[in-house]
Amino acid sequence: MDKKKLKQKSQKVRTPFDLYFLIISTIIVLPFVYTTKVLDPGLAPRLFGLGIITLILLLVNLFTSIKNRPELSFVRLHVFPVFGLYLVWSVISLTQAITPAEGLFDIARSLLSLTLLILATQTFINYKNWISLLVKCVVVSSIIATSIGLYQYFESIPGNVDFNLFMALYEIKGLMGHKNLFAMSLFLMLPFVIFGIVYLKKWWKVLSISSLTLLIINILLLQTRSVWIASIIFVIVLLVIWGFFALRKGFVFNSGSKKQVVLFTAGFLIIFSVGFFIIQKTGALQTLKYKAVSIFNTDSHDNQGRLQIWESTLHLSQDHLLLGVGAGNWKIEIPPYFPYNYDLTYQNWRRPHNDYLWVLAEKGIPGLALYILIFIITVLYGVKVLTKETDQDTLIYTALIISGIMGYMAFAFFDFPLERINHQVYLMMMMASVISIYYRHYPAKSFKNFNSRYVRIHVPAIVFIAASIYFAGVLLKMEFNVHQLFGYRNAQNWKKIIELADKAFTKLTPIDAFSSPIHLHSGEAELQLKNYNRAMADLTTALDYSPNHVSILNDLAIVSAEMHDTKKAIGYLDKCLSIYPKYEPSLYNKVNVYYRNKEYANAYVSLLNCNTMNPRADYKEFMKVMTERVNH
């Protein structure tokens, strides 16, 4: 395949609607599916959007005339059964879950990712101009994303210093929920944009160069260390591939190629210098130095947090090696495993910031093995392509994509791209790219009785995708109501909070995006209204969904004390403090409960456990009263 052939019209197997719809909808449209009216602006909305996209593509497949139906024998390739087994194992893991409903998002996302991978691979196999269209759409999408990033940077950074500057960086998140996720989404565009510079012509080449410039500047400005590491891995893998494969084929060191390498290197240095200049002029240089120095400093605050949560996750995994704790249930099970890792600040970790440990903890060793095997098989396909492919453009594209996948795997060691829809879309596009090129060289055997199987495959798939869309809709509704609920919490409108909590709760979505059961919100509102029986009922239900949630345990203790059940109140507080020994609300509540029950010695001991380095305003008064009572 040469440049001219890549630009030829698609094969007359089918009309190109599915090709254009697939790429434009996922690369350009889906990133704009975003709303600030829910807790996570890009998660549930994009899950819903991806469901709609895959459903439309499946319906197009189903209603295609028999003579134009696409060949599906490629699903015999090993990567697809392995991905399917990973999905099945994720479902099986729910048998171990405290709250199985919390695994539905994981199952829906994995199902949609697998479906997208199949549909993208099918489409790329059927058409010859897909690389050009895919690269052009990524270039357009990257220019839009980086322009938003630069706007947010110059809106947030200038004028800030020290801690305010550090926090201002987190306001630069594009159309993602967090700056680190935004930086990673930009990194995933790099392989396509770099290929655009090599392959595209005229204005598209200019746009690709502009896009790469903006991508590098944004990645530098965002100061996301995990993306810097991913970028380094990307470059190293690309150089290794270049050295071991491209050099052997004898087209790397001709004069034209040497000139391109020199120009590309010089351009990169200029872009890097421009980014550094912007950082210096906007006062963010000190933060940049700290981020760079702290990458391999295990004593830095950020690294300590990750190392501690990784250690705790490993301990959790050791107790659930086969099936894990169930998809989506890490956040429910983890608190008892890190009491000694807590300092005086409560940390509501919702993810372990390491996808491999996350999969291991929730799905056991078999789940992790299947997950890693998906990547290994895909990379091996890419290596085989590099050894057999003769077209230079295809070799360059494959090398860039493999390097991008390896960069993704490095980033996943420090963050959670597995959860994010946008990141999974790009990963599936990269995998589909490698698989489709591999399939051209190593086709699988065709199915027997293909037409009868075609319908039997698509109908169940449509049903499952429709179920995923329904779940995404329910999730959106829950997040919308909880988002409103937080606004009424600030206004202390407790009755409205109860009303919105009732609207938000369903059996499919019992816990919000901040890991709090919906019944916790209504229970706390009932507590404020002194409706203790209702508060007890709601908080008990919340505890069923999340037995290790310290806020629930603390509130249950308060309600029990108000209902004059001292023994139960102390029991809840003891469990809470066994999870988080330095949780001061529970320590002070324990003082109050013992004091009201005239157990002054126990109240005094509980007060001694409170923070004396930075005590509450009423600590001295408490200590004075307790001392008098104990000595009386």
Image (cartoon, rainbow, N blue to C red):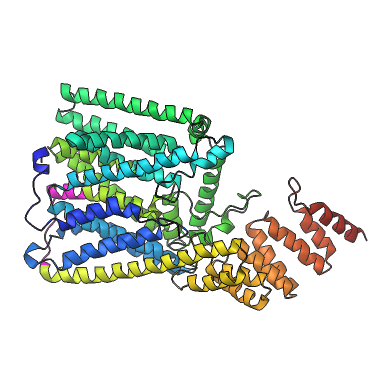
Rendered view: 54 above or below 222: below
Residue visible at 53% across and 44% down in the picture: 307
Along the horizontal axis of the image, is 6 left or right of 482? left
Tally of numbered tags: 0
Locate the C terminus by quadrant. bottom right
Residue at (17% x, 47% y) in the render: 437
Q: Is residue 107 above or below residue 610?
A: below
Report if residue 440 lies within the magenta region: yes
Image-quadrant location for residue 136 = top left
In front of the other: 161 or 101: 161
Magenta part of the protein: which range? 434-450
Front residue (pair 81, 264): 264
Spot occupied by residue 524 in the image (x, y as percentages of width and height)? 62, 68
Instruction: Residue 203 in the image: state x and y as whole percent.
Output: 20, 36
Residue 242 versus residue 10: which sits nearer the camera? Answer: 10
The answer to whether 558 appears left or right of 314 in the picture is right
Residue drawn at (44%, 63%), measured in percent from left and top? 326
Q: Is residue 415 left or right of residue 55?
A: right
Residue 130 visible in the shown view: yes
Q: Is residue 233 visible?
A: no
Residue in view at x 57 percent, y 69 percent: 497
**Depth check, front residue: 122 or 3:** 3
Residue at the extreme right: 632
What x and y, as percent, mark residue 392? 15, 35
Residue 216 at x, y = what percent? 36, 34
Any magenta on residue 404?
no
Quadrant showing the N terminus:
top left
